[in-house]
Amino acid sequence: MTPAEVLSDALAEAAQALRDGGEPFAFATIVRTAGSTAAKPGAKALLSVDGTILNGWLGGGCTRGAVKRAAMQALQDGTPQLVSVAPEDLLAEKGVAAGDQLDGTTFARNGCPSRGTVDIFIEPCLPTPQLVIMGTSPVAQALGALAPQFSWSVASVPQEDRPNRRSFIVIATQGQGDLDALKVALAAKADYVAFVGSHQKYATLAEKLASAGFDKSAIESVNAPAGLDLGAVTPEEIALSILAQLVQVRRAAVTQTNA
């Protein structure tokens, strides 16, 4: 069951509009309360990339600052956050202070007169990364069929209207317009560019790219040959090796952020 299936119609519609627009956002759900609190477990809200509540309700201002910080952190890291907002004396009893993290929970101080405790789970919802597959070769076709099964949004040309979406480009032209495709890919300034071809073939093309005025660091950032070294032979196996590398790069970004 997806989050949208347990939300109110208004919240679900707002979330879908953000998804359709390629905008990052976060769901916040109150999972536990103790003492006197305005909102109760199950209360939900939709938060923007800057932590603003767009829809829903989480109570008064007692939790707003902590939720905002946690939402921004969740969207930056791409990982869920659990924040516990409690009175200062209760934090002291636990041996923690505002801002401390313990067992996956970030603690924040509740300075409101109600002196209640509210635990809020925040789940980031990031735009599906764009995978641009340039070319119509058998490898390109195999990769295009495989990638959507692993939550990649596949396109044939870079799309510049989604500034919040990570972009990955695989050039699988295999002799049919290789240089032109590389120029388009490098000009797009994607997060990752890979070329289906040998080291030697790319070295020749790299010289031409340099002559055309492309930056040396950009030329050297291209992964060539594309894919992990799995000993792949068939187009389907090569596509699998490329997708494995794409997943590795995609997940590494989150790991490095959280290190």
Image (cartoon, rainbow, N blue to C red):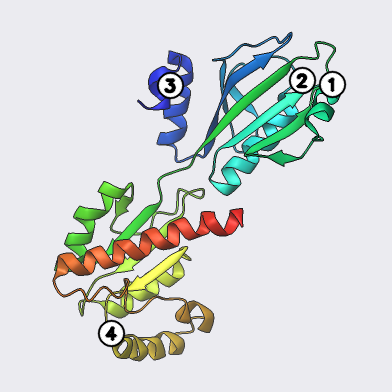
Q: Amino acid at mark 2?
A: Cys
Query: Circle 1: is it few (<14), some (14-19), or many (20+) Cα within 10 Å?
Result: some
**Element type at marker 4?**
loop
Q: Earlier in the sequence, mark 1 or mark 3?
A: 3
Name the residue rendered at 41%, 23% in the picture: 4
- Asked whether disc 1 touches disc 3, contact meaning CB atoms under 8 Å apart, the reply is no
Q: Earlier in the sequence, mark 4 or mark 1?
A: 1
Q: Amino acid at mark 4?
A: Ser
Residue 62's label in the rendered image is 2
**Element type at marker 3?**
helix
For the N terminus, the image quarter is top left
Give the camera-side residue of 135 and 95. Answer: 95
> Where is residue 33 drawn, in percent x and y?
66, 15
> Where is residue 146 drawn, in percent x and y?
22, 54
**Element type at marker 1?**
loop
Q: Earlier in the sequence, mark 3 or mark 2?
A: 3
Query: Circle 4: is it few (<14), some (14-19), or many (20+) Cα within 10 Å?
Result: few
Residue annotated with mark 3: 13
Q: Amino acid at mark 3?
A: Glu
Residue 135's label in the rendered image is none
Q: Is residue 231 left or right of residue 62?
A: left
